[in-house]
Amino acid sequence: MLDLRYVSENLDAVATALASRGFNDQETLAKLESLASARRLAITEVETLQATRNEASAAMGKIADKKSEAFTAKRVELQGLKGRIKELESKSKAIQDELGELLLHLPNLPHESAPVGTSEDDNVEVRVVGDKPSFAFEPKDHVDLGVALDIMDFERGAKVSGARFVILKGMGSRLERGLLQFMLDMHVDQHGYQEVWPPALVKDSSMLGTTQLPKFEKDAFKIKKDSEWEEKNEASHDLYLCPTGEVPITNMHANEILDASQLPLTYAGYTACFRSEAGSYGKDTRGMIRQHQFDKIELVRFVTPEDALSEHALLTSHAENILKALGLHYRVVELCTGDMGFGARKCFDIEVWLPGQNAFREISSCSWFGEFQARRMSCRYRPAPKAKPKHVHTINGSGLAIGRTLVAILEQYQRADGSIEVPEALRPYLGGRDSIRA
C-alpha cells in the first residue's frame, strides 16, 4: 500500500507515476484528491482547536475564584471545545479509513529505473544465457513427449479434478520431486536461504498483506467453512488456498519489528499453489504451462531500503543459477511500467526457452516491492537501538516454478527417439538415471 501522507502531499506526481503503469482511473484519483483535501482540513481544524483549548485551560487555571462567572464561562467554553475536537477527530478518522480503503486499489509506484512502456512489447531484454538447442528433427512439445513416455496423464487428471489438472506418473512424478529437492538444496546450501515449509491455507489478512486481495480475489480459491467449524475454531477470517508461496512466507513477519542486525532475512520454501486463472480463459489450455495447481519454490528476502536494489539483483541471480546448473537456455527481461505486477516497483522476468512452442516463457518473476507489502502487513525494522522503526523492503521470486522447469527439461533435452536426457546436475536426484525412456 502506498504511503498515505506521501500520496496526499504529492498527488500530481503520484498520478503521473500511476499513469505510466496504465492506471488512469480519473474518478478514483479525483476522489483521492477530495478525501486528501478533507483530511488535511480536518487535521488543521483539530490542531487549531487544540491550541485554543490549551489556552482556555491555562486561562481557567489562573482564575482564583472557582465559583465566579468567569470560571464557569471558561469551563463551558472548554467543554464545547472538547466536544468539537472529538467530533472532528471522529470525522478525520472516518476520512482516513476511506482513504486507506481507496489506497488498497492503487498499484505501487514504479522505480525511476524501471523502463516506461505500455505492454510486454516494451519490456527490455537484459541478457540471454546459454545456446538455443538445435535438433536434427522436428521437436515435440512436452504434452506429446510426456504422454508418449507415459509420465503425464491429462485425461485422468481431468477425470479426477477437471480441466487444467494433470497426474504425473512414474519418472514424471520422480522428476517433479527431484527438481523440488534439487532447488531447495541449491538455495539452502549454496545461496544461504533458510528453508521453510509453510501452510497451504492462508488467511485473508495474509492475502491482503501481499496484495492478492482485493485486486486478485477472482483468481483465488476461497475455502467454504460450515458454522460448526467456525464455532470450534473461533474463526473470524476467511481462508484461501495458497496462490503463491509469497503469501505465507512474506507474512511470517507481519506485525513485527525486526532488528537491523537480522537483515537481510532470507527464506526458501516449497508450496503447492492454486489459482483459478479467472482472467486467462482460452490461454495456455494445452499442457502444464497454466494449471489450477502447480508446485513452486519461493524465494523471499526482507532487506533495508538502502540494499534493496542490489538484493533484488542477487535474488534474481539465485533463481537464474538453477537454470544454469540444469544447462537450460533462458533470458532475463526487465518489465516495463505497464507490464509490471500490481505491487512491484521493479521486476525481472526469467524466461526459459521452450522448443515445442518456439518461444521463451516466464519461469520466474523476481519483484522488488519497496515498502508496499510491508506497509500493508505492518512489518518494520529498527535501524539502530531506540531508533524509530522503518518499513522493511520485500523482494521475492520463484526459484523456480517446478512444473515449468520440468517442461523445459523435456523439451530442451529431447532426443530423436522420444527419450529425454537427464541434466547431469539432476541425476543424483533421479537415482543416477541419465535418461527417461518409455
Image (cartoon, rainbow, N blue to C red):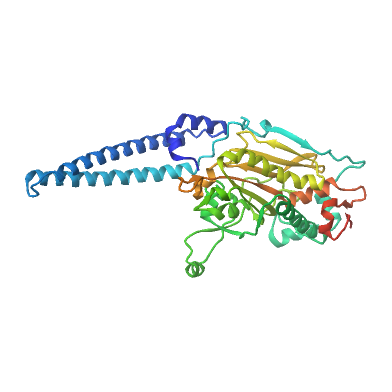
Side (left or right) of 268 relative to 409: left
Q: Position of residue 192 (x, y in %)?
A: 69, 51
The quarter of the displayed image where residue 273 is located: bottom right
For the question of whether residue 174 can be seen, the reply is yes
Residue for point 51% across, 29% down: 16
For the question of whether residue 220 can be seen, the reply is no
- The quadrant of the rendering that contains the C terminus is bottom right
Residue for point 60% across, 34% down: 338
The quarter of the displayed image where residue 279 is located: top right
Q: Viewer-proximal residue, 223 or 171? A: 171
Side (left or right) of 48 relative to 212: left
**In the image, residue 200 above or below residue 17:** below
Residue for point 31% across, 45% down: 89
Total of numbered circles in the picture? 0
Residue for point 31% across, 36% down: 44
Q: Position of residue 157 (x, y in %)?
A: 74, 59
Q: Position of residue 122 (x, y in %)?
A: 66, 30
Residue farthest to the front, as pictured: 385
Q: Position of residue 275 (x, y in %)?
A: 63, 52
Q: Viewer-proximal residue, 234 or 166? A: 234
Q: Viewer-proximal residue, 428 or 330? A: 428
